[in-house]
Image (cartoon, rainbow, N blue to C red):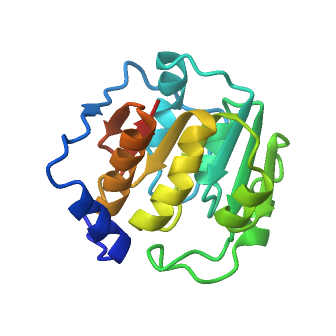
Amino acid sequence: MKMVLEYEYLKSSLANIGKRPIPIIPYNPAKRETPKNLLEIKSSWKGIESILADIIERFDLQTDRCLEFGVEYGYSTAALSSFFDEVIGVDIFTGDVHTGTHRDMYEDTVDRLKGLENIRLVRSDYRDWIKKNNSGFYDLIHVDIIHTYKHTFECGLWAAQHSQCAIFHDTESFRAVKFAVAEICRRTGKTFYNYTDSYGLGIIV
């Protein structure tokens, strides 16, 4: 598990000394289902697509609207479009310090997803998008952005407050992400489930 030192993470860790830890419930899928929309590309998200149907069924989610922060090459976006009527994907499409990608991938991703008409891609920083779209509510929001405590907490808290269910990739590969998800649950009173395969998926309901 990678540790990224940052002021906000250390500050929150110190503030939580003496507080009761947030329970993390292991997520064990009852079934697996391959989505109809599956891209044949390399992705650290592989494996998670097979439990989406199980998450939707277990938590009795509606499947009208899904929002994704962090599209990159579109693997998770395509998988989500198999289950939701509308998927909005928000990304700057230039990668970040943790992905190691710094080239512009927007046109390639648009082309890769062009046959999936229920997907709408928005080229935007999550902070700018949130400011302009603060009143919407979604059945599910996926957060897979830069893996720091600050960004995960800021984006994730909004996601948890504006969705029936919010999911977070990389809870097992980045300590700050897992800690941020736990802190979001502390602030919102929601429950933290964690799937440990495929670099980890935090589930807040």
> 34 left or right of 136?
left
Classify residue 21 by image quadrant.
top left
Classify residue 28 by image quadrant.
top left
> 38 left or right of 99?
right
Does residue 43 appear in this view? no
Residue situated in front as seen by the camera: 46 or 77? 77
The percent position of residue 85, horizontal first and vertical second, equals 77, 30
Residue at image location 75% in from the left, 27% down from the top = 64
**Image: 12 above or below 37:** below
**Image: 30 above or below 149:** above
Residue situated in front as seen by the camera: 143 or 99? 143
The percent position of residue 75, horizontal first and vertical second, equals 60, 52
Q: How many marks?
A: 0
**Image: 135 above or below 71:** above
Residue at image location 48% in from the left, 73% down from the top = 99
Image quarter where the N terminus lies is bottom left
Residue located farthest toward the bottom when viewing the structure as drawn: 102
Residue at image location 37% in from the left, 57% down from the top = 177
Classify residue 160 by image quadrant.
top right
The percent position of residue 167, horizontal first and vertical second, equals 49, 42
The percent position of residue 68, horizontal first and vertical second, equals 64, 49
Residue at image location 79% in from the left, 70% down from the top = 107
Does residue 59 appear in this view? yes
> 31 left or right of 36?
left
Residue located farthest toward the left when viewing the structure as drawn: 18
